[in-house]
Image (cartoon, helix red, strand yellow):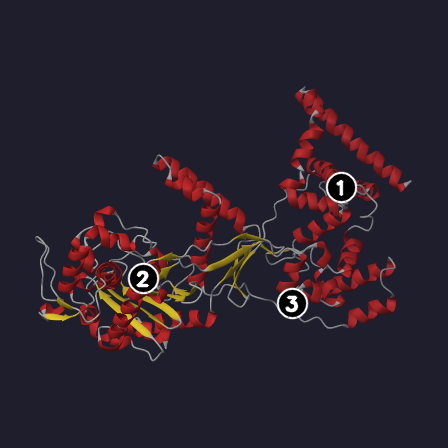
């Protein structure tokens, strides 16, 4: 009788709905197409839960969470049966019997609500709650409740009961910005739902009924009372014996509330930017941008790329990176220790073997999403460009030896007459001495012999984003560029002195979905830049710079160390680029608005940062 009366009530509501629709609009065709529209609206293809994406370090540990709401998705097979039993018993005891709505529960709700001027009780099933959370929102009106019934019924036609329950348990709200059962387990107990005991499962299952009232952090006692009530319900439904329930009630509940994991903001911000670049490459946006016919079209494509990036981030991907936490901490500490409050700086460290970015600091006291000097600051490179644009190409072209002689006195090409540091005239020196002491006169002579076009061909394999054809002047031989390079770009280019090959360095190893399927990863495409002979000679010359040249204040005791330093005009930038047997690191020190730093030159801040990282 109860079920029959409930169905009569539901049917009456449906008749009222359709009658109102017909007479209010006079468009009977809308009624006829309602089912098709409903099927489209409740398509399982449109289910798109925002999930938290995770950034993992080289050891597979999470160091940053991206996206809100905070939701970690757990598949049906990993949800403990006890947890399913307790939520079904507490929220919808006829879940496995009804077709999306419980007619008897609706009848009781209607009778109760007639006493009040607004809805007090909804009689909502788990499926209705899922419909509400996925499609309809939380508005409490009779029209919305009626729509909810249609949506719930359509969901039941599209999904199995297990699929509905899985979605429901990943959608529902558990207070404190936490969505889904796995997320709640991680947030309140810092362990996976599969590791919870029955008392803990019943405890967090108490929250969704009223997330404000049963917030475990602010209302622990009330949550505990509801937990015991749920255990009593399990007893009444024969899912648990009285003795078992009593035992579970006595088990202690100790919250271990976790804070959002948001470590290493410099590196995390870079990873997000690299992910967008990876998506652009894999899904054709990069090619579209390259071929864009106008600025307007370029902006449109960039907008599409941003939307796609946000879709990926909100899908709950796991981004495996090469981050080495100890080295990252060391890099940040070095920058903050060595730079005073007036200075800014950046560091990049790349592993020689994997060619992956293992540490990156974006500025002194860096805060997430602030301007990141490591990859967003483009500055004049000064003399650190010489090994790449001058000496490497010269040795490669002429098979020169490191002890070959070169005049290092001041030299002019046309009206361009750069002077050596301090105005000195060292005369004729060896190539290795010339590079170690960073003489401008010899650099200009050598690049003139190589030829500007040939010199720039040598750096074309590198990822210098803002090098332009206007940069092809003799001023480039000592670091005169229109826009310059970022610390990341220069450090990346210096990896070519590891073994003569170049493979663009990245932070991301792979991007996978929640099931472990790899979605994106960089393709390896190493290029030969220097011959073995040139590489060996350049390594010896860089070692000379570390032991007896301008890099000596940064020297570290390693099986191999090679360093090149750079200072730009008017002391606007200080650079140290170098490598050991295991790592390649670049350091930049300067100001956001360039200004003279000659007063701190003898303090060697860039040298000290490099040395502290590499020791």
Quadrant location of the N terminus in the rendered image: top right
Q: CA distance from mark 2 to mark 3?
A: 57 Å
Pair 1/2: label in front: 2
The C terminus appears in which quarter of the rendering?
bottom left
Residue 573 falls in image quadrant: bottom left
Q: Which mark is residue 156?
A: 1
Where is residue 201 shown, x and y percent of the image? 73, 63
Residue shown at 70%/70% (left/top)? 253
Q: Is residue 136 visible?
A: no
The residue under label 3 is 189
Q: Residue furthest bottom?
A: 557
x, y percent for residue 30 = 68, 24
Q: Earlier in the sequence, mark 1 or mark 2?
A: 1
Within-10-Å neighbours for mark 1: few <14, some 14–19, many 20+: some
**Sequence order check, earlier mark of 2 and 3:** 3
Q: Secondary structure at mark 1?
A: helix
Q: Is residue 182 left or right of residue 318?
A: right
Q: Earlier in the sequence, mark 1 or mark 3?
A: 1
- How many discs mark residues in the rendered view? 3
- In the foreground, 473 or 450: 450
Task: Tell me whether the residue at label 2 lies in contact with that at label 3, contact meaning CB atoms closer than 8 angstroms.
Answer: no
Residue linked to disc 2: 531
**Is residue 537 placed above or below 301 in the rendered structure?**
below
């Amino acid at each position: 009788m109860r079920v029959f009366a409930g169905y009569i009530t539901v049917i009456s509501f449906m008749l009222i709905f359709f009658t109102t629709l017909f007479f209010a609009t006079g468009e009977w065709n809308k009624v006829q197409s309602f089912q098709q529209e409903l099927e489209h609206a409740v398509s399982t293809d449109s289910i798109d839960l925002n999930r938290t994406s995770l950034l993992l370090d080289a050891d597979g540990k999470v160091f940053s969470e991206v996206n809100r709401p905070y939701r970690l998705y757990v598949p049906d097979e990993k949800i403990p049966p006890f947890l399913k039993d307790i939520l079904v018993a507490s929220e919808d005891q006829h879940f496995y019997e009804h077709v999306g709505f419980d007619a008897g529960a609706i009848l009781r709700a209607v009778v109760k609500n007639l006493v009040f001027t607004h809805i007090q009780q909804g009689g909502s099933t788990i499926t209705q709650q899922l419909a509400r959370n996925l499609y309809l929102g939380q508005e409490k009106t009779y029209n919305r409740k009626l729509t909810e019934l249609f949506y719930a019924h359509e969901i039941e036609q599209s999904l199995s009961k297990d699929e509905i329950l899985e979605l429901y348990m990943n959608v529902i709200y558990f207070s404190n910005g936490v969505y889904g059962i796995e997320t709640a387990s991680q947030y309140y107990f810092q362990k996976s739902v599969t590791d919870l005991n029955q008392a803990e499962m019943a405890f967090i299952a108490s929250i969704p009924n009223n997330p404000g009232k049963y917030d475990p952090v602010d209302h622990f006692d009330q949550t505990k009372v509801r937990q015991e009530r749920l255990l009593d319900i399990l007893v009444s439904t024969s899912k648990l014996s009285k003795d078992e329930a009593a035992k579970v009630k006595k088990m202690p509940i100790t919250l271990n509330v976790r804070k959002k994991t948001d470590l290493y903001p410099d590196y995390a911000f870079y990873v997000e930017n690299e992910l967008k670049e990876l998506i652009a490459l894999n899904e054709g946006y990069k090619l579209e941008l390259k071929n864009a016919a106008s600025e307007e079209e370029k902006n449109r494509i960039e907008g599409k790329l941003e939307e796609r990036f946000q879709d990926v981030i909100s899908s709950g991907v796991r981004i495996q990176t090469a981050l080495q936490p100890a080295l990252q901490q060391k890099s940040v500490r070095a920058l903050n220790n060595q730079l005073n409050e007036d200075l800014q700086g950046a560091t990049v460290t790349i592993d020689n073997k994997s060619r992956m970015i293992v540490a990156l600091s974006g500025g002194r006291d860096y805060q997430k999403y602030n301007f990141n000097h490591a990859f967003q600051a483009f500055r004049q490179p000064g003399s650190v460009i010489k090994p790449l644009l001058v000496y490497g190409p010269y040795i490669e072209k002429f098979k020169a030896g490191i002890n070959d002689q070169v005049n290092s006195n001041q030299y002019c090409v046309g009206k361009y007459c750069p002077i050596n540091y301090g105005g000195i005239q060292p005369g004729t020196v060896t190539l290795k001495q010339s590079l170690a002491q960073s003489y401008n006169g010899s650099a200009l002579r050598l690049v003139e012999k190589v030829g500007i076009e040939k010199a720039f061909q040598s750096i074309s394999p590198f990822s210098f984003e803002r090098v332009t054809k206007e940069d092809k002047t003799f001023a480039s031989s000592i670091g005169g560029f229109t826009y310059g390079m970022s610390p990341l770009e220069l450090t990346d280019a210096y990896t070519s002195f590891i073994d003569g090959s170049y493979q663009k360095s990245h932070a991301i190893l792979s991007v996978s979905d929640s099931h472990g399927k790899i979605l994106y990863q960089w393709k390896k495409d190493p290029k030969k830049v220097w011959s073995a002979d040139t590489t060996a000679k350049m390594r010896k010359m860089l070692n000379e710079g570390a032991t007896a040249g301008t890099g000596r204040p940064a020297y570290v005791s390693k099986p191999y160390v090679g360093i090149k330093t750079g200072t730009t005009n008017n002391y606007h930038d200080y650079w140290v680029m170098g490598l050991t047997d295991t790592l390649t690191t670049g350091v930049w020190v300067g100001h956001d608005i360039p200004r003279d730093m000659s007063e701190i030159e003898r303090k060697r801040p860039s040298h000290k940062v490099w040395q502290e990282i590499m020791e």
